[in-house]
DNA sequence: CCACTAATCTGGTATATACCAAATGAAAAC
DNA sequence: GTTTTCATTTGGTATATACCAGATTAGTGG
């Protein structure tokens, strides 16, 4: 498809037609995950449009989750979404398996923190309660999937920071502290990334991602951990099995 | 805040600073839901930037879910998100209550359809099985929240289309056909809107929304209904309670 | 006061151009 | 063959301008 195929007499904007073309190319399976897409300038020349219009089409395809931009290196075809059953597990790394072929966890920061009003409500602790706070990036095949900011009640997990946080913390908490996750309260919404998240996920700050917040409860029904994951929108897929209550 | 406050010697792009300003204005609560935001041209003049840059900031704020654009009428502050507990109910209208003060359901189309491969898999029926297909928009206080495309097995609901579809179909199916929803399988992801969806939700087609797909099962464990809801991203918030299984 | 028309405002689409800065590839030097 | 430097390519940011078309407001006439 090229400039001759852009029917400019129709009502369909040029950028839409380019979106359709790119979408078809990606969805056809002809391009592998992480395969490079043509540059803004190449598309502009190919279709006889301005670079800004080409850019717009590429941004839309990114928005659709079919592609991602990687700094000045170019844009690439997105890998498949990760299906995460939120009604069965509260730990993605436990789900995928830490020894799975593609999962990498990077610790970005860790520190002691004190519960503010919001956190004290989430964790059912008094304001000022000492918490562990750690921020990590989860990468799948070296491709950042989501950023997680998590808080754990310090009194329940003495010496938590002496352990390697590049693993499932729920598995760690169960193994080392005998605190198994029994249930979780989860909230999912779409929102924009902040600067740090965007930087860690290699996305512009105004991009939208999917946020998954969860409070994890132990067998005694008390919360012990609160986390926020912000996912690249094109990678996230959450499933659940619901039993209807009346 | 105006042009004097845009510090152009810093590294922060102008559009980011305008985003921050708009975001603060909206989040401060000084603007009510559905209050008008300044136009692109007004912001460009106020901050001494180009209209394209102003536009970019406004689009980002929309993307963040804090505002929505309404044709050529302008941009407005988004209403609050609707929290929808997907682990308890499979019917949003039943949740909100059809006699609730703000819910309106509009039927966009209805027709008989035949199950293709994908639908036959979802509904556990043979390909070619006769289905009801209906597309509806759900509005909250006259503001479109999501578009739903739903399929129901025709043999289970004779004369379904003789009923008013401007109501909860799960409630209708239980009341008129004694087919109560027992459980559901739900999938949530982020994707771009197609043209029809975008038109119905008053959004540009390249905008991302949250898609919620669900298969509804009766007490006999057989699926009877499959639906796809595509939500305006700024309005959706899904919650769930998970029991951890090992 | 109401209806119609014109003017104005709004967001939407597109372009050409300019510049920046990170990343990559090619060429030159050791 | 390896390292360094330069050139090119890439996405990112910004601008001024043009035009379109829907929506609203203002003005005019009955």
Image (cartoon, coloured by chain):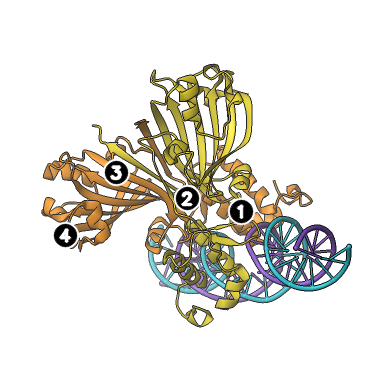
Chain colours: A yellow, B orange, C cyan, D purple
Mark 4 or 1: the one toward you: 4
Q: Name the residue under label 4.
A: B129
- Marks 4, 2: nearer the viewer: 2
Q: Name the residue under label 3.
A: B185
Frontmost of labels 1 and 3 is 3
Chain of the residue that carries numbered disc 2 in the rendered image: A
Element type at mark 3: strand
Residue at figure coordinates x 12%, y 45% from the top left? B177
The chain containing the residue under callout 3 comes to B
Which residue matches tag 1?
A: B57
Give the quadrant of the C terminus of chain B.
Answer: top left
Give the crowd class for mark 4: few <14, some 14-19, many >=20 residues within 10 Å: some
Which one is nearer the viewer's eye here, A110 or B33?
A110
The chain to which mark 1 is attached is B
Quadrant of residue B45 within the rendered picture:
bottom right
Q: Residues within 10 Å of mark 2 (few under 14, many from 20)?
A: many
The mark closer to the camera, 2 or 1, is 2
Q: Mark 2 points at which residue?
A: A235
């Amino acid at each position: 498809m090229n400039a001759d195929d852009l029917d400019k007499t129709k009502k369909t904007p040029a950028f839409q037609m380019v979106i359709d073309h790119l979408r078809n190319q990606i969805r056809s399976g002809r391009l592998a995950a992480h395969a490079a897409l043509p540059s803004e300038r190449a598309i502009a020349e190919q279709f006889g449009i301005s670079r800004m219009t080409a850019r717009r089409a590429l941004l839309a395809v990114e928005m659709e989750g079919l592609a991602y931009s990687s700094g000045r290196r170019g844009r690439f075809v997105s890998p498949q979404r990760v299906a995460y059953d939120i009604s069965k597990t509260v730990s993605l790394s436990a789900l995928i398996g830490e020894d799975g072929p593609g999962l990498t966890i990077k610790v970005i920061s860790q520190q002691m923190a004190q519960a503010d009003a919001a956190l004290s409500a989430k964790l059912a602790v008094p304001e000022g309660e000492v918490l562990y706070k750690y921020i990590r990036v989860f990468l799948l095949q070296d491709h950042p999937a989501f950023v997680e900011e998590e808080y754990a009640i310090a009194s329940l997990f003495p010496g938590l920071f002496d352990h390697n946080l590049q693993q499932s913390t729920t598995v760690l908490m169960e193994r080392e502290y005998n605190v198994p996750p029994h249930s979780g309260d989860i909230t999912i919404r779409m929102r924009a990334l902040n600067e740090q998240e965007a930087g860690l996920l290699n996305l512009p700050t105004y991009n939208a991602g999917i946020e998954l917040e969860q409070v994890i409860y132990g067998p005694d029904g008390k919360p012990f951990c609160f986390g926020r994951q912000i996912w690249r929108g094109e990678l996230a897929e959450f499933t659940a099995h619901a039993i209807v209550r009346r």
